Amino acid sequence: MTTDDMTLVRAYVRHHSETAFATLVARHINLVYSVALRQVGNPQLAEDITQTTFIILSQKAKSLSVNIILSGWLCRTARFVSANALTLQRRRQAREQEAYKQSMLNETQSNAWTQIEPLLETALAQLGEKEHNAIILRFFEGKDLRTVGAEQGASEDATRMRINRALERMRRFFTKRGIELTPAVIAAAISANAVQAAPWYLAQSVTVVAVGKGAVASGSTLTLAKGTLKLMAWSKLKTTAITSAVLLLGALSTATVTQYFQHLPPRQAGRLHLPTGNVKPMIGAGRHFRLILASDGSLWCWGEEIPVFRVLGLSDPQIHHTVSLRRIGRETNWVNAAVGDTHCLGVKSDGSLWAWGVNTDNELGDDSATTQPVPVPSVPGNDWRQAAASVASSFGLKTNGTLWAWGNNWAGQLGIGSTNRVCFEATQVGASTHWTKVWAKGIQTVAQQADGSLWFWGSLSGTTDTNEVRIPTRISPDTNWTDVGFGDTTVLAIKADGTLWSWGKYAHLYTGSADTNSTMVPGQVGTENDWITCASSARSYHLLTKKDGSLWELDARGNYPKPSKPAANLVKFRKIKLQKPIVATAAGSGGGVVLTRDGEVWTWGPVFGEHSPQDLVDLKRRVELNPKFRIIDQPWQVSNIDAAE
């Protein structure tokens, strides 16, 4: 059917009626201006885009179908103009305006509109044309369901279902970006805020310039109009090409197509560089989440959490999963960070120790036995310099060289000689005052003293047996150890000469030793002598770097547990294709994370942050679920969002 809008368009085309065009402008200018303003975030540029959109309407009015929904067409055109405007602006001013705009996402959660506004146009652009137009008519223009249905040639019930489907798709879009809102809240936020008043003088200016098809428009406006018309033409051509591609994909198996999309990185918002500074950066890999200490002293995390765990450390109680890094607090005075399975520790520049996450065994050291969603003061003192964490166990190294431990101790991993399952008070490990560094993973702990010697305690076999070492025990006479990583009841360590060594339950898988018994005698792994760092996960996935900056993985997960595996089938190194200046690494859950010198974060393996709390646990039955994670084998870059910006 022909709408009143298209009657006015026909009047303008046939009689060149300025009155008809002016009516259209007055009717839709607020809508177009609002779309432009959201896209570019600049009122002056939004005015130019609004002007351009109506110029294009005047030029294409003759070719528009009488059945078109003009308000939907204007929104799409305004997006084309906005996209072209941003491209021209980037070229002129040599800056990434769109990326900057996305980084301005306001994550304060003070109201729904503040959350969705920066992403609204992207969410709408992904809807089908009928769903898109229904949302525009219903919530942007405030029309009732009967009117919306009449304009779209559908019944009221069909229109209601169409709008509900569109809102559900938008809900899923926002949820994947860490914004948890119901369809009803999204609808209410759009209705109340989506259309803003354009400047009072803009309608008259738009009408005069557009009716003249841009003859009196500024040079920049004409350039924008021409570029957008070309872009729209290309979009139509691209749609045809996509249709052909879909037909081609139809000839392929569903499994092939699904596999292709499974390996695409998640869509993200925000920047692609963390801030940089002079602090030594660190990365920690926990259960379904990752923590990064950036070199400017700020803390960031991404991943997912069961609500009762609250291990992400974010102040916003609504965010339980995120595929982009999000900042923890506003401080820039963090100097050290450690990650356990479901808790984290951090040291600030004033020597204070902080903790957050699960606290069932007082692993947070705050004597509360209560899960803490954000960093809280841990064991008192202002002389802490390093922290380490494993499964419900915690360690702190003081500036005086003493080492302290608290939390779970079922396998002797605290090194305090006790047989008690839990140590609720911070207890000194041995009597030495020469500890310089401590590493912890699973139920094993390794620490280094000032003379370069390495000391081990915990369980070498994962069970309480004769292989349990309850006090620090020296590994070897060597004093040239430089780095340590843990596998599954197996330790890897690097010496100053660049050689790699291993001991523990599955060390023979790396060393080729005929002795498959648990041992504390290090055996050399391979013959290479250019290793410099080693990071490992509790499930025998290791990430190492060489002196030439190359990155390598050593993946023994497929060999676990095979104590009788022949030496001929030793676990082999595989080079990771990532040529970047790496300053920090972490390994966990079958994948790696690296941080580059200029603040880029790259990861591979399981994709964390895509599961909602409902995917992870059934709170009614109190049963933890095991959702399937997407696996991306090749490195992809993780963005970051600073909620305060």
Image: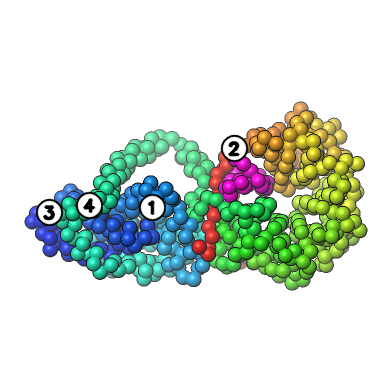
Residue lying farthest to the top in this orientation: 568
Identify the element where label 2 is drawn: loop
Q: Do the residues labelled 1 and 3 touch (CB within 8 Å)?
A: no
- Say what amino acid the circle numbered 4 marks: Ile
Q: Are marks 4 and 1 in contact (CB under 8 Å)?
A: no
* 90 relative position to 503: left or right: left
Q: Which residue appears at 71% of the width and 33% of the height?
A: 572
What number of labels is visible? 4
Q: Name which of mark 4 and mark 1 comes first in the sequence.
A: 4
Q: Distance between the residues labelled 1 and 2?
A: 34 Å
Residue 558 shown in magenta: no
Q: Are marks 2 and 3 in contact (CB under 8 Å)?
A: no
Mark carried by residue 56: 4
Q: Which residue appears at 28% of the width and 57% of the height?
A: 48
- Say what amino acid the circle numbered 3 marks: Val
Image location (x, y in percent) of residue 197: 30, 68
- The stretch of residues the image draws in magenta is 579-606
Q: Foreground: 580 or 1?
A: 580
Identify the element where label 4 is drawn: helix
Mark carried by residue 13: 3
Q: How far apart are marks 2 and 4 (CA)?
A: 46 Å
Q: Name which of mark 1 and mark 2 comes first in the sequence.
A: 1
- Say what amino acid the circle numbered 1 marks: Gln
Image location (x, y in percent) of residue 39: 37, 57
Identify the element where label 1 is drawn: loop
Identify the element where label 3 is drawn: helix
Relative to 454, does residue 196 appear above or below in the rendering? below
Residue position for label 1: 126
Q: Foreground: 116 or 499?
A: 499
Image location (x, y in percent) of residue 293: 65, 55
Mark carried by residue 65: none
